[in-house]
Image: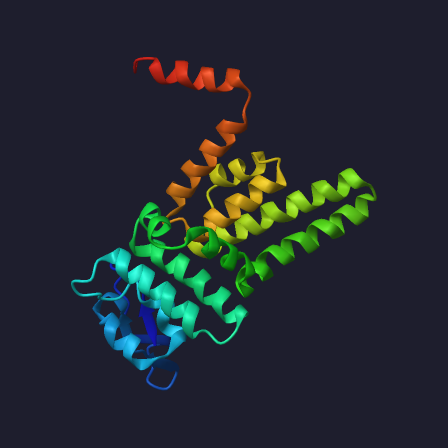
Amino acid sequence: MVVVLRRGGRPVGRWRLGSAGPRAAIICRFRVVRLWQVPAQSVVATGLNGLYPFLPPMDGGEVPAATVLRRSEELITHQSCSAQETADAKGALAVLSTLVHALAAVESALNWRETMLDLRESAVYQVIVGEGRREGREEGREEGREAGREEGELRGLRASLLRVLEVRFGPVPAAVAGQVGQVTEAGLVSALLDRALVAPDLDSFSRQMAAALLALAPPWVESVHAIAAEQPDP
């Protein structure tokens, strides 16, 4: 089965591996499910709580998007079996919602602070960040000093951030990777990691990161940017 999360792609239901000969190929056939064509109410009626994070991209009929988002969150909260399942489902809901709705609308409709806390507790987040921190601790031990451990953890968090961006949006452009390398505060990298998980696209994330870096820059840097913006085009 191939699940298409939003409009734009044209997936095929048949895939062939091998040569043109009739006996030298493997042919796979898939059922293609376009989520925006699936009635959301029919999924709610099944009672399968594992599908609730997929409700926002589905066809909600005449129901406002904000209502669908809030209802999805309520279903997950009340029907998940454990705290870990709730965290995983709410994390998935946050990511899938931003594929079809503006981030500001998602933040407004959901209990965003609680959702982000759940996202940090989700299994996927813990695996990604945990790998980065382990890499950082190992690098720090090799350097053998406190500053080395801190720098190693920062490098590990940067690696986790780049990994999330690559998984979500494909190969990371050198310019974006360079921006990540400019972040020198572990807390900011962690905050950007949260944003990377829910950003609708790479350009949006890059703008948010640039704004965060500019906010941390000395006042004279912001003045230079302002002066440059006022200069007429040649």
41 relative position to 188: left or right: left
Residue drawn at 37 percent across, 73 percent down: 51
Quadrant of the image occupied by residue 93:
bottom left
Residue drawn at 43 percent across, 39 percent down: 206
Which quadrant holds the C terminus? top left
- The reply to whether residue 84 is in sight is yes
Residue 90 place in picture, x, y as percent = 44, 63
In the image, is residue 180 above or below residue 93?
A: above
Residue 153 place in picture, x, y as percent = 68, 46
Which quadrant holds the N terminus? bottom left
**Front position in the image: 203 or 70:** 70
**Front position in the image: 91 or 133:** 91
What scheme was used to colour the molecule? rainbow
59 relative position to 172: left or right: left
Of all residues, the one furthest to the right in this rendering is 144
- The reply to whether residue 171 is in sight is no
In the image, is residue 70 above or below residue 24?
A: above
Residue drawn at 55 percent across, 60 percent down: 121
Residue drawn at 53 percent across, 53 percent down: 163
Residue 68 place in picture, x, y as percent = 28, 62
